[in-house]
Image: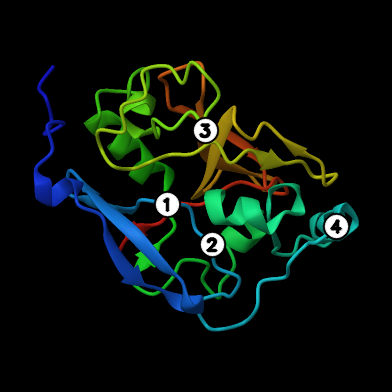
Amino acid sequence: MKKVSLILSAAVMTAMMLSSCGGSSYKEVKIGNQVWMAENLNVDKFRNGDPIPHAKTAEEWQQAVENKQPAWCYYDNDPANGKIYGKLYNWYAVSDWRGLAPEGWRIPSDADWSKLVELLGGREVAGGKLKSTDTTYWKSPNTAATNETGFTALPGGGRYDDGNFYYVGYYGYWWSASEGSATSAWHRSMHYYYSNVFGYYSGKELGFSVRCVRD
């Protein structure tokens, strides 16, 4: 298969700090003709400045689920995890009309994710090229991880609709903007034991990480 500039140029591999809404800054990386955030989203305000509700307890997360309202949290409700993995968002936050993505960015569609995965050789191998090599965060063996793209995917885990957390260190999950049904939306995931990028649709009430792509 053609090596789609997987031997990436220095310009492509260089991550730059950029301003975003909410006073945060983000690294970015160019992969093919897409520009992605090189870290997970960590905003607590929508693009218009409205606060995104912070679900600090399992009960608050459940309430957001029942009311189909946007919410974010830290894994295990621990701000220290936010410094590593960013925030977890339900899909009601992802799809909110006020805009979860900072100015100049958007939530990637499932087609955006598919384009990235195909560029990197397909779903069986793309995960290795996207995963961070740091086994401080990924459980060993972190199969095939090279991070040759500079995407630096981390295993931030997820949150169930009942407020329980799961699989930090084992899985990373990222929402797309693409709806699967009235109750589900598409996401991508990576696993410590596989080189794959998996694509599924799951309930909108789950808490997943978010990466943005440039408009």
Counting the numbered discs, the total is 4
Outermost residue toward the bottom in this view: 49
| Eye-nearest disc, 4 or 3 | 3
Q: Is residue 52 visible?
A: yes
User: Residue 181 is drawn in which quadrant?
Assistant: top right
Q: Secondary structure at mark 3?
A: loop
Q: Secondary structure at mark 1?
A: loop
Q: Please, is residue 106 above or below residue 108 in the view?
A: below
Q: Is residue 87 visible?
A: no
What quarter of the picture does the N terminus occupy? top left
The residue pinned by badge 4 equals: 57
The residue pinned by badge 2 equals: 42
Alpha carbon separation for disc pair 3 and 1: 16 Å
Of label 2 and label 3, which has the lower sequence position?
Answer: 2
Q: Please, is residue 195 above or below residue 66 in the view?
A: above
Q: Secondary structure at mark 2?
A: loop
Mark 4 residue crowding within 10 angstroms, few (<14) / some (14–19) / many (20+): some
Residue 39 - label: 1
Task: Name the spot of residue 108 as percent of width and height, x first.
Answer: 41, 52
Q: Are marks 1 and 2 in contact (CB under 8 Å)?
A: yes
Mark 2 residue crowding within 10 angstroms, few (<14) / some (14–19) / many (20+): many
Alpha carbon separation for disc pair 1 and 4: 25 Å
Of label 4 and label 3, which has the lower sequence position?
Answer: 4
Q: Please, is residue 57 above or below residue 164 in the view?
A: below
